[in-house]
Amino acid sequence: MSIVTIVIQNAPYGEGNKAWHALRFAGAALVEEMEVRVHLLDQGVEVGRREQAVPEGAVDLGALLAELIECGLEVRACGMALDGCAIDTEALIPGIERGSMKALANWVKTSDHVMVF
């Protein structure tokens, strides 16, 4: 089984919809029976916020992320980025763990593929 680590650095609903594309790819990789892990970094930690303001016509990325977690997606959010965005663990979607650069480095080390959005 292939292992893919996806790093999301961009805030949800931003220019280019990078967070949306990252989650779309994560879902597709899960369907292809890959082991998928997502690390939320920088403004990407906003993707993991339980309460999000979803722009009209956009997909609710929080709901999508929660659904993917139920399907086996493993998600961590960078602790320093969480602190910088004033997000405590209670404000995160259930199933998201507080992570670190050391944990991300371990994921990268054990991954077959690494993608950054």
Image: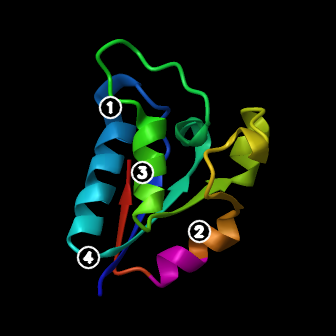
**Which residue position holds label 1?**
17
Instruction: Describe the element under mark 1 as helix, strand or loop.
Output: helix
Q: Nearer the viewer, mark 2 or mark 3?
A: 3
Query: Given this view, does label 2 or label 4 mark the residue nearer the observer?
Result: 4
Dot 4 or dot 1, earlier in sequence: 1
Q: Which residue is mark 3?
A: 67
Q: Counting residues from the N terminus, which is met first, the one under dot 2 or under dot 4?
A: 4
Where the N terminus falls, by quadrant? bottom left
Crowding near the residue tagged with mark 2, few <14, some 14–19, many ≥20 C-alpha atoms within 10 Å: many
User: Magenta part mainly helix, strand or loop?
Assistant: helix
Contact, mark 2 vs mark 3 (Cβ under 8 Å): no
Residues in magenta, as a range = 106-110
Instruction: Please provide percent x and percent y for residue 40.
Output: 55, 50
CB atoms of marks 2 and 4 within 8 Å = no
Tell me the element at label 2.
helix
- Which residue in the rendered view is the most extreme toward the top? 56
66 relative position to 32: left or right: right
Between the residue at mark 3 and the residue at mark 4, the CA separation in whole angstroms equals 16 Å
* Quarter of the image where one finds residue 35: bottom left
In the rendered structure, which amino acid carries the disc numbered 3? Glu
Amino acid type of the residue that numbered disc 4 sits on in the rendered structure: Glu
* Residue under label 2: 104
